[in-house]
Image: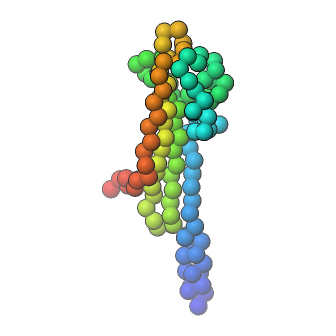
């Protein structure tokens, strides 16, 4: 009987949804729309914080990344989704272009 009760409790607890938000601390996707062409790097850092990463090939391309990993239950498959913002600066350090990329929720690959 104890085994049955333990199994039921474990099953009940494992059915809860767990969502993890990741990315650079303080990143707010809602603030991305405040960045406009002509803004300088200082304003971008003030608004969004430090970039998640800076391009290895061009210091004038910054990326802000936010993603979620969700697991429906203890034995369920994990799913992820992400949003990223690419900001390109001109030679004067002003925003030349912004580009948002959304990856809709999909199953997270599990290595064999």
Q: Nearer the viewer, residue 14 or 98?
A: 98
Q: Nearer the viewer, residue 106 or 30?
A: 30
What residue lies at 44% left-to-right and 52% top-to-bottom? Answer: 105
Q: Residue 27 sits in which quadrant?
A: top right
Q: Residue furthest bottom?
A: 1
Q: Residue 55 sits in which quadrant?
A: top left
- Residue 49 rendering spot, x and y as whole percentages: 63, 28
Indicate the quadrant containing the C terminus: top left, top right, bottom left or bottom right.
bottom left
What residue lies at 51% left-to-right and 36% top-to-bottom? Answer: 65
- Residue 74 rendering spot, x and y as whole percentages: 51, 66
Residue 52, above or below 112: above
What residue lies at 54% left-to-right and 12% top-to-bottom? Answer: 93
- Residue 34 rendering spot, x and y as whole percentages: 60, 29
**Does residue 25 appear to the left or right of 77 in the view shown?**
right
Q: Residue furthest left?
A: 112
**Does residue 46 appear to the left or right of 57 in the view shown?**
right
- Residue 95 rendering spot, x and y as whole percentages: 52, 19
What residue lies at 44% left-to-right and 37% top-to-bottom? Answer: 101
Instruction: Please name the colour scheme applied to the rendered image.
Output: rainbow
Residue 40, above or below 86: above
Residue 101, above or below 89: below
Residue 104 visible in the snapshot: yes
Q: Nearer the viewer, residue 91 or 69?
A: 91
Residue 41 visible in the snapshot: no
């Amino acid at each position: 009987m104890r085994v049955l009760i333990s199994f039921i409790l474990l099953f009940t607890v494992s059915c809860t949804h767990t969502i993890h938000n990741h990315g650079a601390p303080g990143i707010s996707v809602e603030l991305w729309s405040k960045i406009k062409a002509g803004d300088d790097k200082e304003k971008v850092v003030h608004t969004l914080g430090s970039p998640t990463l800076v391009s290895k090939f061009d210091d004038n391309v910054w990326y802000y990344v936010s993603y979620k990993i969700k697991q429906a239950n203890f034995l369920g498959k994990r799913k992820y989704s992400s949003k990223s913002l690419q900001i390109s600066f001109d030679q004067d350090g002003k925003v030349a272009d912004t580009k948002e990329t959304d990856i809709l929720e999909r199953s997270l690959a599990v290595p064999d």
